[in-house]
Image (cartoon, coloured by chain):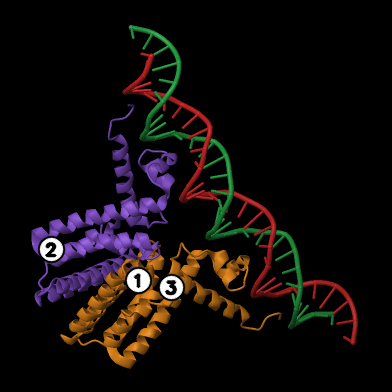
Chain colours: A purple, B orange, C green, D red
Amino acid sequence: MRYEEDHKEKTHAKIVERASQEFREHGFEGVGIAKLMAKLGLSHGGFYAHFEDKEDLKDQAMEHAFGESFEIASDALRRGGVLAYVEHYTSDLHKDHPGYGCVLPTLSTEEGRRSPESRAKFARKFQESVDLLAEHLPGDTPEVKRGRALFIFSALSGSVAIARAAGDPLLSAAILRSTREQLTQFLRGL
Amino acid sequence: MRYEEDHKEKTHAKIVERASQEFREHGFEGVGIAKLMAKLGLSHGGFYAHFEDKEDLKDQAMEHAFGESFEIASDALRRGGVLAYVEHYTSDLHKDHPGYGCVLPTLSTEEGRRSPESRAKFARKFQESVDLLAEHLPGDTPEVKRGRALFIFSALSGSVAIARAAGDPLLSAAILRSTREQLTQFLRGL
DNA sequence: TGTACATCAGTGAACGCGCGTTCACTGATGTAC
DNA sequence: TGTACATCAGTGAACGCGCGTTCACTGATGTAC
């Protein structure tokens, strides 16, 4: 063999990983296949030996990004509970680096325009993160915990999306601060 | 004159209005100038007599959409206060008709990738809605009221964006319901 | 041990297509003389 | 009153460009005999 045994899988994984980062940074439509492959030192023709089409890559990149976000959330929750996760999510670091951040503020809107099949995959992966967060929340029943987790994700992702859109740095900071403070109060009140 | 005196302004307004709806439905990149003009019974060449370029149209369409949302919010707030606005925002009607809904869940992410000048305009227009909502909220100082308004917009816009992305209707409903309930509790607690 | 062939990840030219943008033009009307 | 010209919103062919996708090919290696 010209290449090592797992060479193709490694290349495949590299493409998915890089795509998931670029998609979060520039959106699905802002990332071209030729440019993406070139960034990995590959030519664009080989792309179709790895993926059926661009939609296939989007699916796999979304799954990868959710997995990555899950790990980051898992770490923060283990380290300092929901408060630590909220602090991390509303940080300037997260706001300023969408490519390495949560999928929700960067790709939810575009995902909403994709096929029902892709959106079902999105829902399934999102559920995993919701369940994870719910485990770290108080509540009499799993439904109550999950409802609270959904609310927290809504507030967090909305605040980061708007903070990134706002050209005014003071406003961006105020959005993230307000959400952090109100969620902190919310958690204390439970 | 071949046309009435205000004919051009009316055409201009029609383009902006339609664009603001199409942009919210399909995203900035999902709307082509030729198709947009064709939908209004016009040819694409005339576009550049009305706008400098597509970015110019985006700016004007965003401003228009914010103005429209402002009026809708204003009505709901006058009719039933913040609770009525929250109910309307988290309704299935709003979730299922992005073209006629709030700009935040549909265009915040893409706006975050635009020029600093455009984002500054976004920030200014968003502030108007924040101030409007803040007026209807309790709080000792204007800053406290505005902070609460920012939090509410974050939670609302995030919930609608994720609910639209989720292919599972049960999950979509749960996201909107949770946000509605938690915000209702939040408002009662103030 | 040497030769012919099979394998297969990756290459790069070529395709059709839709996009934003330009520009010479049209044609109905108003105006000047 | 009639003719020549100016105005100007809108037309539609044409442009270069980047996109997703296809496909005949390459070339290093493994395998068969």
> Which quadrant of the view contains residue B127?
bottom left
Q: Amino acid at mark 3?
A: Met
Left or right, B108 with reference to A76: right
User: Which is more N-terminal, label 3 or label 1?
Assistant: 3
| The quarter of the displayed image where residue D6 is located | bottom right
Q: Mark 2 and mark 1 in contact (Cβ < 8 Å)?
A: no
Q: Is residue A167 visible?
A: no
Residue drawn at x 34%, y 54% as measured from the top left: A59
Q: Which residue is mark 2?
A: A84
Query: Please, what is the three-letter code of the amino acid marked with disc 1?
Result: Pro
Q: Secondary structure at mark 1?
A: helix
Residue at (57%, 71%) from the top-left corner? B39
Q: Is residue A79 visible?
A: yes
Q: Is residue B143 left or right of residue A29?
A: left
Rendered-image quadrant of the C terminus of chain A: bottom left
Disc 2 is attached to a residue of which chain? A
